[in-house]
Amino acid sequence: MKFALIITAAATLSAAAANLITNPGFQRDGMGEMGLWSVNLGAYENIATKRPGEGIDGCDAVRFDFTEYGSFKLPGFRLVAKEPYRIGAYVRTSNFRSQTSAVLIFNEGWYNDVRTDPFPENTNGEWVKVEKVVTMPESSNGLYTFDIYAPHPEPGSILDLCQPFIEPMSERALAESQSPTSPLENIRRIIPVTPPLTAIPVNDQALDIAIVWPLPGPADDFDLHVKTRRDDVDAFGEPLRYRLPITQELRAALPALPPGAGHLRLELVRRADGDVVLANDYLIRIITPRPEPPARRLNNLVSELVGADLRDGEFPFSLARDGWVFVGFSEPQPEAAAFLDGSDTAMVRFRPGEPSDAMRFLSAGDHVVRVRGAQPGARLSIRTVPQLMLFPMTIVPVNDPVNFRYDLDFFRRHFWHSINTHICSYAWIPKSDLEKTVDQEIKERGIRLIGSGGFSGENWTKADVMAKSIRTAPPALTTSGRALDEIAASSTPTILNAVSEACWSLADFDKTVYVWMAGTKGYLNCRPLHLPFLAGVSNASRGTGKLLMETYVTGVADEAELKSYMTLLNQHLRTARRCAPDAASKMAMMMSGYLTAGTWNCNTHPQTDMKYVFDYFYYVIANDPELTGLFGVGCYDINRTDEEYARWIGRLIRHYGVEGNVTMLSEQYNFTCNPGHLRGGDFEENAADWRLAPAEPDSLKPMTISGYGRNHLRRRAGNASLGDTVLHFTRSAKAPNRVSQTATGLTPGRVYSLTYVTADPDDIANFKNERQHVVLEANIDGGETMPEKGYEFRIPAGWENWPASAKRREIVTRKIVFKALRSDIAITFSDWLSDDTPGGAIGQKRILNSISLNPYFGEE
């Protein structure tokens, strides 16, 4: 009897378990051609093509083209952690081959997912059901995304899909799960798109306006009423009325106001009965536009307002809008100083060992620089520059390049003449003597600080909680603003709308709100969702709110791939400009300093010099006509890269963002994308480029460890298998295991760096949680090593010391800096400390890969 009851209950549940995907046929609605699925179409228009009537039982199907991007998402599900669900779809494939594929569900932030088995290679024209019962992982805010996932399919692969499903498989899952509702239902706002509400020209008092909220009737039944009033007047004047077009978008003139602060009310009114179905109030400012001053454009980022021989006297200039200004002398002069706008405190003064220049954020209008103590022979330059940002400002008492931590002198020499804004890790509350010294100095230099801080779990969905925190918490109170870290363009609509609404409520806030947008390809590609979001963010903080785009640069195989990869920057702006024509002025492109194996690692190809890759990022921004108008550029984060690259990042930002250069900095140092001195740094192709000398049979051999590159080296490559090939050492008592290669094409007298990564294969297979004694030595025959410039860096340790529960394996990176003594040198790796001393336990195992040999960027 008990068995029968169980069967009956299961049958009842199965019958009641409706598919949580309410649009399995990919039908059109207000969100776009495929309903909510349309969030995928803005950036990759060819990713999905409808196949009407071709699906199972005559339903509509979709054919996917995952050549550019291998993911087709449906966000916004509320599911129940630890409860069972059946997930899947019907697929039809032909010659379908991909590194991985699945129907899957991931939690907020994609920290975990559950998935089906991979799609079959061929279904012979038939529809095959791919499904799996899964247990839902935890999600920080209870939200999940359904995803059809098949990155990097081989050419000729065909994948058709229909009737995707998520079915609750328990009473609790059935009772508490929720399908995504139309995200547009919650965007109950008449949206001012452009211009910013705090910069409405007095001679063109009009706004582009959009409504994405589904109307309670045909658009032609409604009028838009536009009302304004001066700040010192209580009542709104008579409205201007506009018939709402079917697109629900229009340009509307405002009842004219004089220059200054004012108020705007937008009302959506049903024409038949005068019922106001939607209304919003906004703070506005009418401005008198200033003419663009005469300037010499140096590149997309920098224009020169004044270029003159340095002399005592005054140099006037003007700005059409608020922004950053650089004032500098072409060479330091001990007695020369520059004073801004009548101040008695020098803006530019002599600092030994540093350039004589500084930057300030100035308001639109007329300004003057007064020079005193100048000697003949130098030049004065006054330039407009973008906001130049760097994260973080971690300054230590003693320079510690082994752990990527730098002292005050390092910041002075390598950063503080390249940037004008530091993004802090949290708030800025100077306590120690060092911090107080730093605080005083950054104020003297005019450097701005931005606090940081995101929200936990459900709070990302609560506009009032976020707005209160931004106004009252230390990050903004102790700095000039707060960077919200982080959301993504693909975040659930609930989060996007909540952040937007929080920003609208911060329209009067006197500190700038910045929003980090995660994902190198995190395009604002869904106009119905991202237009309201961008409008909300950019109108926060009296019209100064900004997006910080995580356009993190991933390593590439060669220069052709690099050039193709960098078109992602263009795609960011193309999609954003669909939301607002002036989108560039609301966005910064932020490069990443994540170059360390074992943590988030963009250094994915050993044959590639990331100095050149970083250079090309800024070069494109500085030169591509499509990328003009950005409010800022920068880098996040220098705590994840070594001292050489930290100096290079500072130099690059200055080269393009201050000096206004249009040629690659790499040309000055003969850096190239692929130096080509070594081959096979990951021992791919069975270590064919190396000479192996095992101490005994099987003590030295190439192998593949699935997931090592992605999961342990943490390489963020499109090809998930990059880094899986290694050379495996087992220490012998008889003799060292050796592997060698002749590096070619070096320049005698030039300095180079050799880096490599090693780990314990037994630790990789089964977590040990121990710090190991590592003996895997590199010998450079034909090079003079410079020990003071090299290091060994371990993860987890120090600032990346995760708890044991994280089960992060020990990854060891070594860097050797040397001067080449001849053009061809022999590089040998050995698992003995020396020719006659093992130095470690016999039988100990190590794996080796990620070997790079590049020209070194030395101190200037």
Image (tube, rainbow, N blue to C red):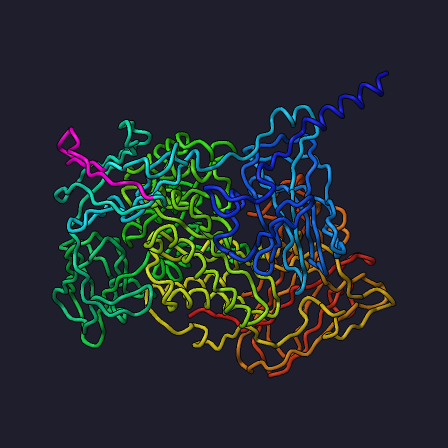
- Farthest right residue in view: 697
Q: Residue at x 59, y 56 (%)?
A: 716
- In the shown orientation, is residue 835 left or right of residue 811? right
The part of the chain drawn in magenta is 226-245
Q: Is residue 718 magenta?
A: no
- Decide which of 140, 602 is in the foreground and name it: 140
- Decide which of 242, 296 is in the foreground and name it: 242
Q: Residue at x 76, y 65 (%)?
A: 832
- In the shown orientation, is residue 799 left or right of residue 220? right
Report how many numbered discs are placed on residues in the image. Answer: 0
- Decide which of 52, 625 is in the foreground and name it: 52
Q: x, y percentage for residue 243?
A: 27, 40
- The quarter of the picture where the C terminus appears is bottom left
Q: x, y percentage for residue 168?
A: 67, 31
Q: Is residue 807 above or below residue 151?
A: above
Q: x, y percentage for residue 512?
A: 32, 43
Name the quadrant containing residue 529. Answer: top left
- In the shown orientation, is residue 448 left or right of residue 97? left
- In the shown orientation, is residue 714 left or right of residue 563? right
Q: Residue at x 53, y 72 (%)?
A: 559
- Decide which of 200, 694 is in the foreground and name it: 200
- Farthest top residue in view: 1
Q: x, y percentage for residue 696?
A: 86, 68
Residue 511 seen by the camera: no
Residue 685 seen by the camera: yes
- The quarter of the picture where the N terminus appears is top right
Q: Residue at x 41, y 36 (%)?
A: 214
